[in-house]
Amino acid sequence: MSFEEEVLSKDPNYPTYTRKYWGWLDSCAKKVSADIINITDIKNKKILGIGTGHGRIEAILGKNGAKIIGIDIDPRELFFAKKRMLYNNISNYSFIVADGGKLPFKSNIFDMAYANSVLEHTDNYQKFISEMLRVLEKGGFFYITGINALRIEKRLIIKLRHIFSKSNKKPSGYKIKHFFTPFKIKKELRGTDHFFWHEEPRYIKHPLKRIIEGVLAKFKILPYLRQELVVIGTKNSY
């Protein structure tokens, strides 16, 4: 039985709007965590998670020996994140209620920082990225994902969901406020070495899609056409 089924499903205070997304959220967390673990050795590294939510990624990284500091603007999210850490017997973490645009940390103190699907929900994404880079030590890694504005069909689907679903009843932190082109994000990442990552075609199941994406990958176009941009890099000077 999963943590969600054993613990969260029995909690009357658990927000109902996330229940139907458990499987999808878990798969996303596993994918992001695998990316982060593949970037560098995370054992005993001080890692900042911005937009912790219910702590899925933080639990996986904590199990792999990272020292996790997670922040979120919503204390209710962190309440459930702490439950997840306790359930998994993880003690090497700290959760703080804070805004990603105004981090309560000194400069140059983290080995790595990540923000998964958070950027599009911020009021000021420029300040958000600036703060993330500020708290990273020189040579520290960052991992950022965000909705790609070049994928018009994705933007349309999201806007239609907002109109016709109950998404307008979610807390303000869940509302999408920005869409990004790769070029917008690159502008904010001056002073870093970074690249836009994409899945290798061999991981894509459909044969025709594998061929098309293989061609796009060869010409280094594919990373810019993903539905969700994934930016990985290191801080050099900032």
Image: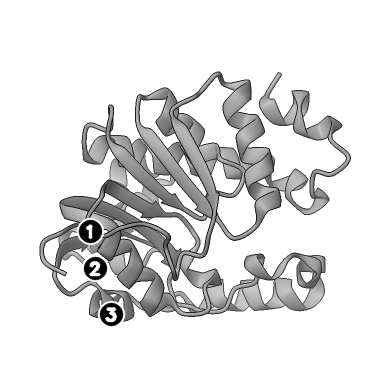
Point out the tag, 1 or 3, that comes first from the N-terminus: 3
Q: Give the percent coordinates (x, y) of residue 163.
A: 77, 78
Do callouts 1 and 2 mark residues in contact (Cβ within 8 Å)? yes
Q: Residue at x 76, y 44 (%)?
A: 19
Which residue is the site of mark 3?
183
When the figure is inspected, residue 18 is found, relative to residue 3, above or below; the finding is below
Instruction: Describe the element under mark 2 as helix, strand or loop.
Output: loop
Q: Which mark is residue 80?
A: none
Instruction: Describe the element under mark 3 as helix, strand or loop.
Output: helix
Q: Nearer the viewer, residue 180 or 206?
A: 180
Quarter in which the N terminus is drawn:
top right
Q: Which mark is residue 217?
A: 1
Q: Residue at x 25, y 50 (%)?
A: 109
Residue 216's quadrant in the figure? bottom left
3D distance between C-alphas at marks 1 and 2: 6 Å
Q: Amino acid at mark 3?
A: Phe
Which residue is the site of mark 2?
221
Q: Nearer the viewer, mark 2 or mark 3?
A: 3
Q: Give the percent coordinates (x, y) of residue 203.
A: 35, 40
Q: Residues within 10 Å of mark 3 (few under 14, many from 20)?
A: few
Q: Nearer the viewer, residue 14 or 145?
A: 14
Image check: 9 left or right of 101? right
Instruction: Describe the element under mark 1 as helix, strand or loop.
Output: helix
Residue 232 visible within the image = no
Q: Give the percent coordinates (x, y) of residue 141.
A: 23, 50
Point out the tag, 2 or 3, that comes first from the N-terminus: 3
Q: Nearer the viewer, mark 1 or mark 3?
A: 3
Residue 24 visible within the image = yes
Q: Give the percent coordinates (x, y) of residue 142.
A: 28, 54
Do callouts 2 and 3 mark residues in contact (Cβ within 8 Å)? no
